[in-house]
Amino acid sequence: QVQLVESGGGLVQAGASLRLSCAAAGRTDAIGIMAWFRQAPGKDREFVAGCRWGGPDTYYADSVRGRFTISTDNAKNTVYLQMNSLKPEDTAHYYCAGTEYYTFSALAASYEYWGQGTQVTVAS
């Protein structure tokens, strides 16, 4: 089992930056892929960014490519999501997810482990 805990969300103005963190505990050696998803009210959960646990491969949704960066610090068992040039449409609850599979997937159903999420609100 793997436990995931997110932090770093908040309320910011459009154009600002935030860094989300996801601390992993438990059988972290079993993790293949880590990802960030988000869900806005009334919408489906959508893929944001993903990476191999330990790198270097990264994957991004078109809507965030060039603005968001996913990275890992395996010594700290932590995954980060650096979010720059935030837009009001980035407002959502952001979730960290992990899977023991090593093949990347943008589908939420492919991930076994989920955190409780952290809220990001971007004001215009």
Image: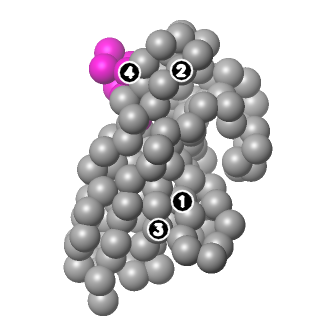
Q: Is residue 96 above or below residue 24?
A: below
Q: Position of residue 35 (x, y in %)?
A: 56, 42
- Magenta span covers which residues? 73-79
| Amino acid on which disc 1 is placed | Arg
Mark nearest the camera among 1 and 4 is 1
Q: Could you tell me how far apart the alpha carbons at marks 3 and 2 are, in whole angstroms?
A: 24 Å
| Amino acid on which disc 3 is placed | Ala
Secondary structure beneath dot 1 equals: strand
Label annotation for residue 77: 4
Q: Residues within 10 Å of mark 2 (few under 14, many from 20)?
A: some
Please state, as top left, top right, bottom left or bottom right, where the C terminus lies in the image: bottom left
Q: Residues within 10 Å of mark 4 (few under 14, many from 20)?
A: some
Secondary structure beneath dot 3 equals: strand
Earlier in the chain: of badge 2 and badge 4, it is 2
Earlier in the chain: of badge 3 and badge 2, it is 2
Residue at which label 3 appears: 92
**Horizontal placement of 110 versus 18: left or right?**
right
Residue at x-position 47% and y-position 13%: 26
**Horizontal placement of 23 versus 65: left or right?**
left
Q: Could you tell me how far apart the alpha carbons at marks 1 and 2 are, in whole angstroms?
A: 20 Å
Q: Are marks 2 and 4 in contact (CB under 8 Å)?
A: no
Earlier in the chain: of badge 1 and badge 4, it is 1
Residue at which label 2 appears: 2
Q: Position of residue 65 (x, y in %)?
A: 51, 62
Q: Are marks 1 and 3 in contact (CB under 8 Å)?
A: yes
Q: Could you tell me how far apart the alpha carbons at marks 1 and 4 are, in whole angstroms?
A: 21 Å
| Amino acid on which disc 2 is placed | Val
Residue at which label 1 appears: 38
Q: Could you tell me how far apart the alpha carbons at marks 1 and 3 are, in whole angstroms?
A: 6 Å
